[in-house]
Image (cartoon, rainbow, N blue to C red):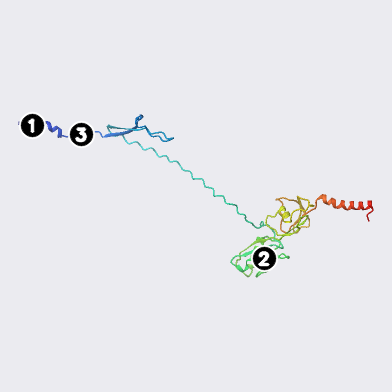
């Protein structure tokens, strides 16, 4: 009986003993790959225009773990700066500006004088028939023939001579002297000048042509000149302040002005009309 017990114990000892090399068993390795076959009972759901993904197949193997795959380098694509967004279209502002800096002032012009930090000396001044303006403190100052910047310099020079320390003066044209439209127009006369005046504008202000007018041509006498210049009536013909615009009579009516008296005289002689 004792011998039988020893035999049973000897047979059971190997079951509790740790087998040699058991701690060195290779780890399990898992892999996932796509299975090219698709089960018939569960067809993959395919969205419109997107190919269906193949089902995955899982397997378990034994053996050493493979070294981790090197991470794919991240491609860095330089992002170009976004193109500047053009600003929304802004309607062009119509700004009425003074004539060019070369415009010469004359009798009838009105200028706006600004003396910075001196409100009592700032205001509008009319250029008199003698070509001068009456300015506070310094009295009469010659303005005709000067440009607006030149007049500003002259005023600053005179104010600095015993009245103000380093005065700053700005001059701009407030109102231009008028121009004149005469001859074969319906409303001849004097008209206020506006910046950008053309021959077409002048004829329109004069009420348009009369039936006897020679259309398309005008004669312009600039201020200070003794002779007229022949100009075409279009947008390119500019009118200046103080100009005299004359619309002449057409050649037909000029000829008729000579022919009609002659025909009347001949008729009187023929029929004896006293």
Residue that numbered label 3 is attached to: 22
Which residue is disc 2 drawn over?
Answer: 125
Badge 3 element: helix
Q: Is residue 267 above or below residue 74?
A: below
Q: Earlier in the sequence, mark 2 or mark 3?
A: 3
- Residue drawn at 67 percent across, 65 percent down: 125
Residue toward you, 187 or 146: 187
**Label 2 secondary element:** strand
The C terminus, quarter of image: bottom right
Structural crowding at the residue carrying mark 3, measured as other residues with C-alpha within 10 Å and reported as few (<14), some (14–19) or many (≥20): few
* 26 displayed left or right of 228: left
Where residue 127 sits in the image (x, y, percent)? 70, 64
**Which callout, 1 or 2, points at the residue further toward the start of the chain?**
1
In the rendered image, residue 75, in percent from the top left (x then y), is placed at 42, 39
Looking at the picture, tell me which residue is in the foreground, 70 or 42. 42
Measured in 3D between alpha carbons, the distance from the residue under mark 1 to the one under mark 3, in whole angstroms, is 27 Å
Which element is circle 1 on?
A: helix
Instruction: Kindly identify which numbered label has been placed on residue 6.
Output: 1
User: In the rendered structure, are the residues bearing label 1 and label 2 in contact, judged by CB atoms less than 8 Å apart?
Assistant: no
Percent of width and height locating residue 106? 71, 61
The quadrant in which residue 114 appears is: bottom right
Tell me the CA gap for discs 2 and 3: 115 Å
Return the x and y of residue 11 as percentages of the image width and height.
12, 31
Residue in front for this viewpoint, 117 or 153: 117
Closer to viewer: mark 1 or mark 3 = 1
Q: Quadrant of the N terminus?
A: top left
């Amino acid at each position: 009986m004792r011998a039988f017990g020893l035999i049973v114990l000897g047979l059971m000892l190997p079951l509790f003993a740790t087998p040699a090399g058991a701690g060195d068993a290779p780890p399990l390795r898992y892999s996932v790959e796509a299975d090219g076959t698709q089960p018939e009972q569960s067809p993959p759901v395919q969205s419109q225009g997107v190919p269906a993904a193949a089902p995955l197949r899982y397997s378990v193997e034994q053996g050493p773990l493979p070294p981790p795959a090197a991470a794919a380098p991240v491609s860095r694509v330089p992002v170009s700066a976004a193109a500047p967004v053009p600003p929304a279209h802004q309607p062009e502002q119509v700004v009425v500006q003074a004539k060019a800096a070369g415009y010469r002032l004359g009798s009838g012009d009105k200028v706006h004088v600004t003396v910075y930090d001196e409100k009592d000396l700032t205001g509008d001044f009319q250029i008199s028939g003698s070509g001068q303006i009456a300015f506070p403190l310094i009295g009469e100052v010659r303005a005709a023939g000067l440009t607006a910047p030149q007049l500003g310099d002259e005023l600053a020079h005179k104010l600095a001579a015993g009245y103000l320390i380093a005065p700053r003066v700005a001059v701009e044209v407030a109102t231009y002297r008028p121009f004149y439209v005469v001859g074969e127009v319906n409303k001849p006369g004097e008209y206020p000048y506006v910046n950008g005046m053309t021959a077409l504008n002048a004829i329109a202000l004069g009420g348009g042509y009369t039936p006897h007018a020679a259309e398309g041509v005008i004669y312009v006498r600039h201020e200070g000149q003794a002779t007229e210049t022949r100009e075409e009536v279009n947008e390119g013909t500019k009118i200046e302040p103080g100009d005299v615009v004359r619309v002449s009579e057409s050649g037909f009516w000029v000829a008729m002005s000579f022919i009609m008296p002659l025909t009347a005289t001949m008729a009187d002689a023929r029929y004896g009309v006293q």
